[in-house]
Amino acid sequence: MNENSTNTEVLIQYLDAELQGEDLETLKKNLTNDQSLREELENLQLAQEATRSYGLKTKINAIHGEMMHELKENKSPKASLIKMIIQNGLRVAAVLIMLVGLSALYQYLTTSPEKLFNENYHPYIIHEMRGVPESSMLREKYKKGNMDSVILEFSSLNSPQPEEYILAGIAFLENNQSAKAIETFKTLIQKNSDAKTDYFEDDAEYYLAMSYLNNQEPEKALPILEKIQADPKHPYNNKLSEWFILKVKSLHGKG
Amino acid sequence: MEIKKDFTDQSLIQSLRSDANPDEAIRFLYRTQFRLTAAYIKQNRGTEEDAEDIFQELVLVFIEILKKDKFRGESSVSTFLYALTRNIWLNELNKRGKSKLRDENFEKSKDKVDMDVSHLIVDRETKSQMMQVVDKLGDTCKKILLAFYFENLAMKEILQTLNYENEQVVRNKKYKCLKQLEQMMIAEPNLLKNLKSVLL
Protein backbone atom coordinates (compact mmCIF):
# COMPACT_ATOMS: atom_id res chain seq x y z
CA MET A 1 0.00 0.00 0.00
CA ASN A 2 1.53 3.36 -0.99
CA GLU A 3 1.65 6.46 1.19
CA ASN A 4 -1.38 8.10 -0.46
CA SER A 5 -3.66 5.17 0.13
CA THR A 6 -2.37 4.85 3.70
CA ASN A 7 -3.28 8.49 4.25
CA THR A 8 -6.75 7.95 2.80
CA GLU A 9 -7.35 4.97 5.04
CA VAL A 10 -6.30 6.93 8.13
CA LEU A 11 -8.49 9.86 7.09
CA ILE A 12 -11.50 7.59 6.69
CA GLN A 13 -10.83 6.05 10.10
CA TYR A 14 -10.68 9.59 11.51
CA LEU A 15 -14.00 10.56 9.91
CA ASP A 16 -15.58 7.33 11.16
CA ALA A 17 -14.35 8.15 14.70
CA GLU A 18 -12.25 4.99 14.72
CA LEU A 19 -8.85 6.64 15.18
CA GLN A 20 -7.43 6.85 18.70
CA GLY A 21 -4.35 7.63 20.77
CA GLU A 22 -1.05 8.35 19.09
CA ASP A 23 -2.42 7.81 15.56
CA LEU A 24 -5.09 10.44 16.19
CA GLU A 25 -2.58 12.97 17.55
CA THR A 26 -0.22 12.38 14.61
CA LEU A 27 -3.01 12.91 12.09
CA LYS A 28 -4.17 16.11 13.78
CA LYS A 29 -0.61 17.42 13.63
CA ASN A 30 -0.27 16.44 9.98
CA LEU A 31 -3.56 18.11 9.13
CA THR A 32 -2.31 21.39 10.59
CA ASN A 33 0.76 21.34 8.36
CA ASP A 34 -0.45 19.66 5.19
CA GLN A 35 -2.90 21.53 2.94
CA SER A 36 -3.41 18.63 0.50
CA LEU A 37 -4.21 16.29 3.38
CA ARG A 38 -6.83 18.76 4.63
CA GLU A 39 -8.34 18.93 1.15
CA GLU A 40 -8.55 15.17 0.90
CA LEU A 41 -10.24 15.07 4.31
CA GLU A 42 -12.84 17.59 3.12
CA ASN A 43 -13.45 15.65 -0.09
CA LEU A 44 -13.95 12.40 1.78
CA GLN A 45 -16.27 14.15 4.19
CA LEU A 46 -18.33 15.41 1.26
CA ALA A 47 -18.45 11.90 -0.19
CA GLN A 48 -19.89 10.69 3.12
CA GLU A 49 -22.38 13.58 3.20
CA ALA A 50 -23.43 12.76 -0.36
CA THR A 51 -24.03 9.14 0.63
CA ARG A 52 -26.20 10.16 3.59
CA SER A 53 -28.15 12.61 1.43
CA TYR A 54 -28.69 9.94 -1.21
CA GLY A 55 -29.96 7.48 1.40
CA LEU A 56 -32.34 10.02 2.89
CA LYS A 57 -33.65 11.07 -0.52
CA THR A 58 -34.30 7.42 -1.41
CA LYS A 59 -36.24 6.97 1.84
CA ILE A 60 -38.28 10.16 1.30
CA ASN A 61 -39.05 9.12 -2.30
CA ALA A 62 -40.43 5.82 -1.06
CA ILE A 63 -42.65 7.50 1.56
CA HIS A 64 -43.68 10.22 -0.91
CA GLY A 65 -45.59 7.83 -3.18
CA GLU A 66 -47.42 6.28 -0.28
CA MET A 67 -48.33 9.66 1.25
CA MET A 68 -49.49 11.21 -2.01
CA HIS A 69 -51.88 8.30 -2.34
CA GLU A 70 -53.16 8.83 1.20
CA LEU A 71 -53.46 12.61 0.82
CA LYS A 72 -55.29 12.35 -2.50
CA GLU A 73 -57.76 9.94 -0.93
CA ASN A 74 -58.45 12.45 1.85
CA LYS A 75 -57.92 15.51 -0.27
CA SER A 76 -60.60 17.73 1.16
CA PRO A 77 -60.89 18.15 4.93
CA LYS A 78 -64.63 18.67 4.38
CA ALA A 79 -64.84 15.35 2.56
CA SER A 80 -63.01 13.60 5.37
CA LEU A 81 -65.24 15.32 7.92
CA ILE A 82 -68.34 14.13 6.07
CA LYS A 83 -66.81 10.65 5.82
CA MET A 84 -66.10 10.75 9.55
CA ILE A 85 -69.62 11.96 10.33
CA ILE A 86 -71.13 9.24 8.10
CA GLN A 87 -68.93 6.61 9.70
CA ASN A 88 -69.82 7.82 13.18
CA GLY A 89 -73.48 8.05 12.22
CA LEU A 90 -73.45 4.48 10.95
CA ARG A 91 -71.67 3.38 14.08
CA VAL A 92 -74.22 5.12 16.32
CA ALA A 93 -77.11 3.61 14.31
CA ALA A 94 -75.62 0.14 14.54
CA VAL A 95 -75.04 0.57 18.25
CA LEU A 96 -78.62 1.80 18.75
CA ILE A 97 -80.10 -1.20 16.93
CA MET A 98 -77.98 -3.66 18.83
CA LEU A 99 -78.24 -2.04 22.20
CA VAL A 100 -81.96 -1.24 22.48
CA GLY A 101 -83.04 -2.31 25.90
CA LEU A 102 -79.60 -2.29 27.45
CA SER A 103 -78.94 -0.07 30.42
CA ALA A 104 -77.03 3.21 30.74
CA LEU A 105 -74.17 1.16 32.05
CA TYR A 106 -73.54 -0.07 28.55
CA GLN A 107 -73.48 3.51 27.29
CA TYR A 108 -70.91 4.26 29.96
CA LEU A 109 -68.78 1.44 28.63
CA THR A 110 -69.04 2.55 25.01
CA THR A 111 -68.24 6.24 25.50
CA SER A 112 -65.03 7.39 23.77
CA PRO A 113 -63.21 10.73 23.63
CA GLU A 114 -63.79 11.01 19.84
CA LYS A 115 -67.49 10.39 20.25
CA LEU A 116 -67.76 12.95 23.01
CA PHE A 117 -65.76 15.46 21.01
CA ASN A 118 -67.89 15.03 17.91
CA GLU A 119 -71.10 15.33 19.91
CA ASN A 120 -70.08 18.44 21.82
CA TYR A 121 -67.79 20.40 19.54
CA HIS A 122 -69.16 23.85 18.74
CA PRO A 123 -67.52 25.63 15.81
CA TYR A 124 -66.05 28.99 16.75
CA ILE A 125 -68.11 31.95 15.63
CA ILE A 126 -65.97 34.95 14.85
CA HIS A 127 -66.86 38.07 16.87
CA GLU A 128 -67.32 41.22 14.82
CA MET A 129 -65.64 43.97 16.81
CA ARG A 130 -67.03 47.44 16.59
CA GLY A 131 -64.50 50.22 16.25
CA VAL A 132 -61.87 47.97 14.69
CA PRO A 133 -61.57 49.29 11.15
CA GLU A 134 -59.22 46.71 9.64
CA SER A 135 -59.61 42.99 9.79
CA SER A 136 -56.47 40.85 9.74
CA MET A 137 -55.74 38.67 6.73
CA LEU A 138 -55.89 35.58 8.94
CA ARG A 139 -59.36 36.61 10.13
CA GLU A 140 -60.53 37.00 6.55
CA LYS A 141 -59.20 33.56 5.63
CA TYR A 142 -60.92 32.06 8.66
CA LYS A 143 -64.20 33.65 7.62
CA LYS A 144 -63.84 31.95 4.23
CA GLY A 145 -63.40 28.63 6.02
CA ASN A 146 -60.02 27.83 4.46
CA MET A 147 -58.22 26.28 7.42
CA ASP A 148 -55.02 25.48 5.46
CA SER A 149 -54.66 29.16 4.58
CA VAL A 150 -55.29 30.15 8.20
CA ILE A 151 -52.45 27.87 9.35
CA LEU A 152 -50.18 29.10 6.57
CA GLU A 153 -50.92 32.71 7.45
CA PHE A 154 -50.37 32.03 11.17
CA SER A 155 -46.99 30.43 10.42
CA SER A 156 -45.88 33.59 8.70
CA LEU A 157 -46.71 35.91 11.62
CA ASN A 158 -43.93 37.06 13.90
CA SER A 159 -46.18 38.37 16.68
CA PRO A 160 -49.69 36.98 16.31
CA GLN A 161 -52.57 38.79 18.03
CA PRO A 162 -54.60 36.91 20.68
CA GLU A 163 -57.51 36.32 18.33
CA GLU A 164 -55.13 34.92 15.73
CA TYR A 165 -53.96 32.28 18.23
CA ILE A 166 -57.60 31.28 18.70
CA LEU A 167 -58.35 31.09 14.98
CA ALA A 168 -55.13 29.18 14.25
CA GLY A 169 -55.84 26.81 17.14
CA ILE A 170 -59.31 26.10 15.75
CA ALA A 171 -57.80 25.60 12.29
CA PHE A 172 -55.37 23.03 13.70
CA LEU A 173 -58.22 21.35 15.57
CA GLU A 174 -60.45 21.20 12.48
CA ASN A 175 -57.51 19.81 10.48
CA ASN A 176 -57.19 17.07 13.08
CA GLN A 177 -53.85 18.32 14.44
CA SER A 178 -54.84 18.26 18.08
CA ALA A 179 -51.29 18.42 19.46
CA LYS A 180 -50.65 21.64 17.53
CA ALA A 181 -54.01 23.02 18.62
CA ILE A 182 -53.15 22.29 22.28
CA GLU A 183 -49.78 23.97 21.88
CA THR A 184 -51.39 27.08 20.33
CA PHE A 185 -54.14 27.52 22.95
CA LYS A 186 -51.66 26.92 25.77
CA THR A 187 -49.34 29.57 24.32
CA LEU A 188 -52.14 32.15 24.39
CA ILE A 189 -53.10 31.24 27.97
CA GLN A 190 -49.45 31.49 29.02
CA LYS A 191 -49.06 34.84 27.27
CA ASN A 192 -52.16 36.14 29.06
CA SER A 193 -50.81 34.88 32.34
CA ASP A 194 -47.40 36.51 31.76
CA ALA A 195 -48.95 39.83 30.74
CA LYS A 196 -51.74 39.63 33.36
CA THR A 197 -54.36 39.95 30.62
CA ASP A 198 -57.30 37.75 29.64
CA TYR A 199 -57.68 38.25 25.88
CA PHE A 200 -59.86 35.46 24.47
CA GLU A 201 -59.06 33.48 27.64
CA ASP A 202 -62.56 31.93 27.79
CA ASP A 203 -62.38 30.78 24.20
CA ALA A 204 -58.86 29.42 24.70
CA GLU A 205 -59.97 27.44 27.76
CA TYR A 206 -62.96 25.82 26.08
CA TYR A 207 -61.12 24.91 22.89
CA LEU A 208 -58.09 23.69 24.83
CA ALA A 209 -60.37 21.29 26.71
CA MET A 210 -61.96 20.13 23.43
CA SER A 211 -58.49 19.69 21.90
CA TYR A 212 -57.44 17.49 24.84
CA LEU A 213 -60.58 15.44 24.32
CA ASN A 214 -59.85 15.04 20.62
CA ASN A 215 -56.28 14.09 21.50
CA GLN A 216 -57.47 11.23 23.73
CA GLU A 217 -56.55 13.07 26.94
CA PRO A 218 -59.86 13.35 28.86
CA GLU A 219 -58.00 13.55 32.16
CA LYS A 220 -56.54 16.91 31.06
CA ALA A 221 -59.83 18.13 29.60
CA LEU A 222 -61.87 17.40 32.76
CA PRO A 223 -60.48 20.05 35.19
CA ILE A 224 -60.90 22.78 32.55
CA LEU A 225 -64.46 21.69 31.78
CA GLU A 226 -65.32 21.55 35.49
CA LYS A 227 -63.94 25.06 35.95
CA ILE A 228 -66.13 26.34 33.09
CA GLN A 229 -69.15 24.52 34.47
CA ALA A 230 -68.59 26.01 37.93
CA ASP A 231 -68.57 29.54 36.55
CA PRO A 232 -72.09 30.63 35.45
CA LYS A 233 -70.63 33.77 33.85
CA HIS A 234 -68.28 31.81 31.60
CA PRO A 235 -69.57 32.24 28.02
CA TYR A 236 -69.19 28.50 27.37
CA ASN A 237 -70.95 27.50 30.59
CA ASN A 238 -74.29 26.85 28.85
CA LYS A 239 -72.62 24.58 26.29
CA LEU A 240 -71.62 22.03 28.92
CA SER A 241 -74.39 19.79 30.18
CA GLU A 242 -74.16 17.71 33.34
CA TRP A 243 -74.48 14.61 31.20
CA PHE A 244 -71.50 15.64 29.08
CA ILE A 245 -69.30 16.28 32.13
CA LEU A 246 -70.42 12.94 33.55
CA LYS A 247 -69.35 11.17 30.38
CA VAL A 248 -65.95 12.89 30.42
CA LYS A 249 -65.60 11.80 34.04
CA SER A 250 -66.43 8.24 33.07
CA LEU A 251 -63.70 8.36 30.40
CA HIS A 252 -61.31 9.69 33.02
CA GLY A 253 -62.27 6.77 35.26
CA LYS A 254 -61.67 4.33 32.40
CA GLY A 255 -58.22 5.79 31.64
CA MET B 1 -57.66 0.62 12.59
CA GLU B 2 -54.38 2.26 11.56
CA ILE B 3 -53.03 4.59 14.24
CA LYS B 4 -51.60 7.83 12.91
CA LYS B 5 -49.08 9.23 15.34
CA ASP B 6 -49.35 12.86 16.38
CA PHE B 7 -46.25 14.91 17.20
CA THR B 8 -45.44 18.14 19.00
CA ASP B 9 -42.64 20.28 17.57
CA GLN B 10 -40.25 18.85 20.14
CA SER B 11 -41.07 15.20 19.54
CA LEU B 12 -41.03 15.74 15.77
CA ILE B 13 -37.56 17.27 15.88
CA GLN B 14 -36.32 14.51 18.14
CA SER B 15 -37.66 11.79 15.89
CA LEU B 16 -36.32 13.28 12.64
CA ARG B 17 -32.94 14.00 14.19
CA SER B 18 -32.40 10.54 15.61
CA ASP B 19 -30.99 7.80 13.44
CA ALA B 20 -33.76 5.40 14.43
CA ASN B 21 -36.79 4.99 12.23
CA PRO B 22 -38.06 8.47 11.26
CA ASP B 23 -40.73 7.17 8.83
CA GLU B 24 -43.71 8.09 11.03
CA ALA B 25 -42.34 11.58 11.59
CA ILE B 26 -41.88 12.03 7.83
CA ARG B 27 -45.45 10.85 7.26
CA PHE B 28 -46.60 13.35 9.90
CA LEU B 29 -44.79 16.14 7.99
CA TYR B 30 -46.67 15.12 4.85
CA ARG B 31 -50.02 15.04 6.66
CA THR B 32 -49.58 18.43 8.33
CA GLN B 33 -47.39 20.43 5.97
CA PHE B 34 -47.88 19.23 2.41
CA ARG B 35 -51.19 21.02 1.83
CA LEU B 36 -49.71 24.26 3.19
CA THR B 37 -46.66 24.00 0.94
CA ALA B 38 -48.82 23.11 -2.06
CA ALA B 39 -51.12 26.08 -1.35
CA TYR B 40 -48.13 28.40 -1.20
CA ILE B 41 -46.52 27.05 -4.39
CA LYS B 42 -49.80 27.18 -6.30
CA GLN B 43 -50.49 30.73 -5.09
CA ASN B 44 -47.10 31.65 -6.50
CA ARG B 45 -47.17 30.34 -10.05
CA GLY B 46 -46.37 26.73 -9.34
CA THR B 47 -48.22 23.55 -10.20
CA GLU B 48 -49.23 20.50 -8.13
CA GLU B 49 -46.23 18.71 -9.62
CA ASP B 50 -43.93 21.56 -8.53
CA ALA B 51 -45.44 21.32 -5.06
CA GLU B 52 -44.63 17.59 -4.85
CA ASP B 53 -41.03 18.15 -6.00
CA ILE B 54 -40.48 21.10 -3.68
CA PHE B 55 -41.99 19.27 -0.74
CA GLN B 56 -39.66 16.30 -1.14
CA GLU B 57 -36.79 18.75 -1.27
CA LEU B 58 -38.15 20.56 1.80
CA VAL B 59 -38.31 17.37 3.88
CA LEU B 60 -34.79 16.39 2.83
CA VAL B 61 -33.33 19.83 3.62
CA PHE B 62 -35.18 20.08 6.94
CA ILE B 63 -33.96 16.69 8.17
CA GLU B 64 -30.39 17.50 7.13
CA ILE B 65 -30.56 20.81 8.99
CA LEU B 66 -31.83 19.01 12.10
CA LYS B 67 -29.14 16.35 11.90
CA LYS B 68 -26.46 19.04 11.73
CA ASP B 69 -28.01 20.83 14.73
CA LYS B 70 -28.47 23.98 12.65
CA PHE B 71 -32.10 24.50 13.68
CA ARG B 72 -31.88 26.81 16.66
CA GLY B 73 -35.53 26.50 17.63
CA GLU B 74 -36.15 30.23 17.60
CA SER B 75 -39.35 29.71 15.64
CA SER B 76 -41.93 26.95 15.41
CA VAL B 77 -41.29 24.09 12.99
CA SER B 78 -44.14 25.34 10.83
CA THR B 79 -42.69 28.87 10.57
CA PHE B 80 -39.24 27.49 9.80
CA LEU B 81 -40.62 25.20 7.09
CA TYR B 82 -42.48 28.15 5.63
CA ALA B 83 -39.22 30.14 5.40
CA LEU B 84 -37.46 27.14 3.84
CA THR B 85 -40.26 26.65 1.32
CA ARG B 86 -40.12 30.28 0.28
CA ASN B 87 -36.38 30.12 -0.14
CA ILE B 88 -36.37 26.90 -2.16
CA TRP B 89 -39.24 28.04 -4.35
CA LEU B 90 -37.81 31.53 -4.91
CA ASN B 91 -34.51 29.98 -6.04
CA GLU B 92 -36.43 27.70 -8.36
CA LEU B 93 -38.38 30.61 -9.85
CA ASN B 94 -35.19 32.59 -10.29
CA LYS B 95 -33.64 29.65 -12.10
CA ARG B 96 -36.67 29.45 -14.36
CA GLY B 97 -36.44 33.20 -15.04
CA LYS B 98 -39.87 33.95 -13.64
CA SER B 99 -38.78 36.17 -10.80
CA LYS B 100 -40.13 39.29 -12.49
CA LEU B 101 -43.54 37.71 -12.76
CA ARG B 102 -44.07 37.45 -9.04
CA ASP B 103 -47.46 38.69 -8.07
CA GLU B 104 -48.32 41.17 -5.40
CA ASN B 105 -49.19 38.53 -2.81
CA PHE B 106 -45.80 36.96 -3.21
CA GLU B 107 -44.09 40.32 -2.70
CA LYS B 108 -46.18 40.89 0.43
CA SER B 109 -45.41 37.47 1.83
CA LYS B 110 -41.69 38.10 1.41
CA ASP B 111 -41.85 40.90 3.94
CA LYS B 112 -43.53 38.86 6.62
CA VAL B 113 -40.84 36.31 7.35
CA ASP B 114 -37.39 37.75 7.51
CA MET B 115 -35.72 34.53 8.57
CA ASP B 116 -32.58 33.97 6.48
CA VAL B 117 -32.19 30.30 5.75
CA SER B 118 -30.34 30.59 2.43
CA HIS B 119 -27.00 29.66 3.98
CA LEU B 120 -28.48 26.31 5.06
CA ILE B 121 -29.60 25.19 1.63
CA VAL B 122 -27.68 23.49 -1.16
CA ASP B 123 -29.43 24.58 -4.35
CA ARG B 124 -31.55 21.96 -6.10
CA GLU B 125 -29.34 21.77 -9.16
CA THR B 126 -26.20 21.05 -7.11
CA LYS B 127 -28.09 18.52 -5.04
CA SER B 128 -29.44 16.79 -8.11
CA GLN B 129 -25.92 16.65 -9.59
CA MET B 130 -24.64 15.17 -6.32
CA MET B 131 -27.36 12.48 -6.38
CA GLN B 132 -26.46 11.59 -9.96
CA VAL B 133 -22.81 11.09 -9.00
CA VAL B 134 -23.73 8.74 -6.13
CA ASP B 135 -26.16 6.95 -8.42
CA LYS B 136 -23.32 6.11 -10.79
CA LEU B 137 -21.57 4.02 -8.13
CA GLY B 138 -21.95 0.26 -8.54
CA ASP B 139 -24.79 -1.43 -6.66
CA THR B 140 -22.51 -3.19 -4.16
CA CYS B 141 -20.67 0.03 -3.35
CA LYS B 142 -23.96 1.88 -2.84
CA LYS B 143 -25.21 -0.91 -0.62
CA ILE B 144 -22.10 -0.91 1.59
CA LEU B 145 -21.82 2.87 1.88
CA LEU B 146 -25.54 3.32 2.59
CA ALA B 147 -25.52 0.55 5.16
CA PHE B 148 -22.58 2.11 6.97
CA TYR B 149 -23.18 5.85 6.62
CA PHE B 150 -26.98 6.10 6.31
CA GLU B 151 -28.33 3.12 8.20
CA ASN B 152 -25.43 3.20 10.68
CA LEU B 153 -25.11 -0.60 10.65
CA ALA B 154 -22.07 -2.25 12.22
CA MET B 155 -19.61 -4.13 10.01
CA LYS B 156 -20.86 -7.40 11.48
CA GLU B 157 -24.43 -6.59 10.40
CA ILE B 158 -23.33 -5.52 6.93
CA LEU B 159 -21.37 -8.75 6.54
CA GLN B 160 -24.57 -10.75 7.14
CA THR B 161 -26.27 -9.12 4.15
CA LEU B 162 -23.34 -9.52 1.73
CA ASN B 163 -21.37 -12.49 0.42
CA TYR B 164 -17.93 -11.63 1.80
CA GLU B 165 -15.57 -13.79 3.81
CA ASN B 166 -15.09 -11.56 6.84
CA GLU B 167 -15.42 -8.05 8.24
CA GLN B 168 -11.97 -7.00 7.02
CA VAL B 169 -12.95 -7.70 3.42
CA VAL B 170 -16.07 -5.54 3.84
CA ARG B 171 -13.97 -2.84 5.49
CA ASN B 172 -11.54 -2.83 2.55
CA LYS B 173 -14.41 -2.71 0.09
CA LYS B 174 -15.97 0.22 1.96
CA TYR B 175 -12.66 2.08 1.83
CA LYS B 176 -12.39 1.52 -1.95
CA CYS B 177 -15.99 2.57 -2.55
CA LEU B 178 -15.67 5.81 -0.58
CA LYS B 179 -12.41 6.60 -2.35
CA GLN B 180 -14.10 5.92 -5.69
CA LEU B 181 -16.97 8.25 -4.81
CA GLU B 182 -14.50 10.92 -3.71
CA GLN B 183 -12.70 10.65 -7.07
CA MET B 184 -16.00 10.89 -8.96
CA MET B 185 -16.82 14.08 -7.06
CA ILE B 186 -13.36 15.55 -7.66
CA ALA B 187 -14.03 15.04 -11.37
CA GLU B 188 -16.87 17.60 -10.97
CA PRO B 189 -15.00 20.66 -9.62
CA ASN B 190 -18.02 22.98 -9.67
CA LEU B 191 -20.08 20.50 -7.72
CA LEU B 192 -17.33 20.12 -5.15
CA LYS B 193 -16.95 23.88 -4.77
CA ASN B 194 -20.70 24.46 -4.33
CA LEU B 195 -21.03 21.68 -1.79
CA LYS B 196 -18.06 22.88 0.24
CA SER B 197 -19.50 26.38 0.50
CA VAL B 198 -22.64 25.06 2.23
CA LEU B 199 -21.82 21.75 3.84
CA LEU B 200 -18.37 22.40 5.34
Image: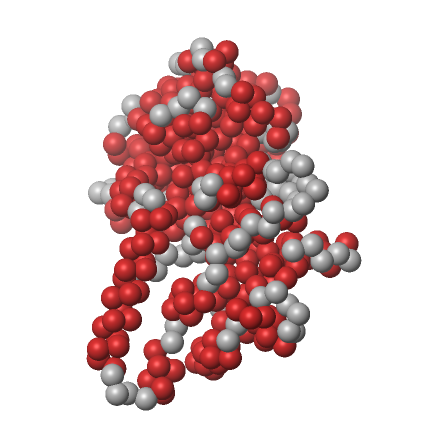
Give the percent coordinates (x, y) of residue A229.
Answer: 59, 75
Give the percent coordinates (x, y) of residue A193.
Answer: 73, 59
Say which quadrant the N terminus of chain B sits in.
bottom left
The answer to whether residue A50 is above or below residue A141 is above
Point 25% across, 66% down: residue: A90
Q: Relative to A182, is B39 on the left or the right?
A: left
Tell me if I can see residue B53 in this picture.
Answer: no
Q: Find the residue positioned furthest to the right.
A: A196
Point 67% across, 37% down: residue: A133
Q: Relative to A46, is A69 on the left or the right?
A: left
Give the percent coordinates (x, y) of residue B171.
Answer: 36, 39
The answer to whether residue A104 is above or below residue B53 is below
Tally of numbered discs = 0
Say which quadrant the C terminus of chain B sits in.
top right
> Which is nearer the eye, A224 or A14?
A224
Looking at the rendering, which quadrant does residue A115 occupy?
Answer: bottom left
Q: Relative to A182, is A247 on the left or the right?
A: left
> Which is nearer the eye, A18 or A92?
A92
Point 52% across, 69% down: residue: A239
